[in-house]
Amino acid sequence: MAITSEGSLAPLPMSPPHKGKGDLLTMWLYLAALVGLYYLLRWYRERQVVSHLWDKYVFITGCDSGFGNLLARQLDLRGLRVLAACLTEKGAQKLKGQTSDRVETVILDVTNTQSIAAATQWVKERVGDRGLWGLVNNAGTFHPFGYTDWLKIDTYMSTLQVNLIGLIEVTLSMLPLVKRAQGRIVNVSSILGRLAFFGTVYSCSKYGVEAFSDVLRRELQHFGVKISIVEPGYFRTEMTDLQKASETMKQVWKEVPPHIKETYGQKFFDAYFENMKNGLLQSSTNLNLVTDCMEHALTSVHPRTRYSAGWDAQFFFIPLSYLPTSLADYILTRSWPKPAQAV
C-alpha cells in the first residue's frame, strides 16, 4: 500500500509478470528463422546454373580411375567438353570406351614439367580464344600408412611432388587459360587437410593444397576466377584398395629401422594394421558424393568456397575440428594402441 496526497492508502502498482522464459523462447525462434532463411537463400543461389555449358571446356587430372574418371563421365552427360588427363594409356582407353566423342584424353604426369607443358599446349589448341572454363586438380597419391618415424624421406618427397607440387605446377601452367575464360579452379584436398590425425605426409600435402587454394582465391578475385576446395572424407577407390594398402603397410613396417621398431613392438603394429584395415572397409563406396561437389563447383553460378564430401566429413570430422585441441586429441586417439616402450 502507498499513502496518497490526501493521506489515504492506495494499492501499489502491480509489477508485470516475469517474461524471462518467453523472451528466451522468442529469441530462439528468431534465430531459427534467420538460420532457415539463410539456408533457403543459399539453396536458391546455388541452384542457379551457368549458361551455355555445352560450349565450355573442363580439364581434369587423374582420370584413370576414381573421382576423376567418374567426374569426366558425369560432366560428359551434362554436355560439357571434357579434356581428361590420364597417367596411363590404358586408363585413357578405358575412359574413351565409357564416354561420348566430346571427351578427349591426354597423357599427363603431374610430376614431370615437360609433360605438363605438353598438356597445356594440347589444351590451348582445343580451347582457343575462349579459354579454359574449368581446371580440376584431382590427381593424387594416397600414403597414410605408417607412423611419422616409420617413413623414409623419399616417401615424403614423392607424395608432396604429386599431391602438392604437381598441383601447383599444373595450376600455374593452365592459369592464363582459366583467366581468359574467367573460369573455375577446383582443387581436391581431403578431410585430412582440415584435421590432421594420421598419415603425416598425406596430411601435409593436403594442408598445402588448402593454403595454396586460399591464397590463390584471394589473389584472383578481381580476375573473375573462382576457386573451390573439395574435402572428401573416407572413400573407397583404387588408391585405397584393401589388398594394396595391406601390402604397403607390411612393407613399410618391414623397412622400419630395428631401433625404431623396438620402441613400438610387433603387437603395436598388429593392432595398428587391424585399425587401418577396419577404417578402409568402412570407407564409402558412393563416389558421387564427391563428384557432385565438383560438378556443382563447375556449373553453379555461385559455387562454394569449400565442399565437405561425405557424411563422416560433414557430421564428424568438421565439427570435431572446432573442438578444443585437447578434447579432439582425446576423441581421435583414445582407441589407439600403445607402443611397447610407452611412458
Image (cartoon, helix red, strand yellow):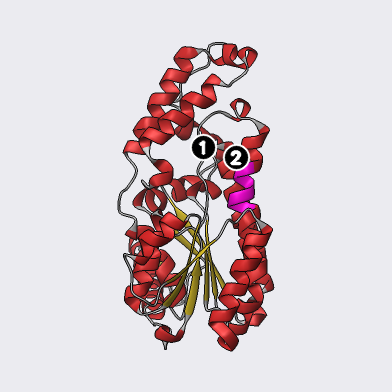
Q: Earlier in the sequence, mark 1 or mark 2?
A: 1
x and y percentages locating residue 165 in the rendered image: 66, 54
**Amino acid marked by disc 2:** Val
Residues at discs 1 and 2 in contact (Cβ within 8 Å):
yes
Q: Which residue is mark 1?
A: 144
**Amino acid marked by disc 1:** Pro
Who's the residue at 50% across and 25% down the image? Answer: 251
Who's the residue at 45% across and 13% down the image? Answer: 267
Q: Is residue 42 above or below residue 2?
A: below
Q: Determine if the magenta segment contains residue 162.
A: yes
Label 2 packing within 10 angstroms: few (<14), some (14-19), many (20+): many
Tell me the magenta residue range.
Answer: 158-164
The image quadrant of residue 179 is: bottom right
Q: Is residue 244 visible?
A: yes
Q: Is residue 190 above or below residue 77?
A: above
The image quadrant of residue 307 is: bottom left
Nearer the observer, 100 or 62: 100
Main SS, magenta region, reads helix
Q: Determine if the magenta segment contains residue 200.
A: no
The image quadrant of residue 279 is: top left
x and y percentages locating residue 164 in the rendered image: 62, 53
Label 1 packing within 10 angstroms: few (<14), some (14-19), many (20+): many
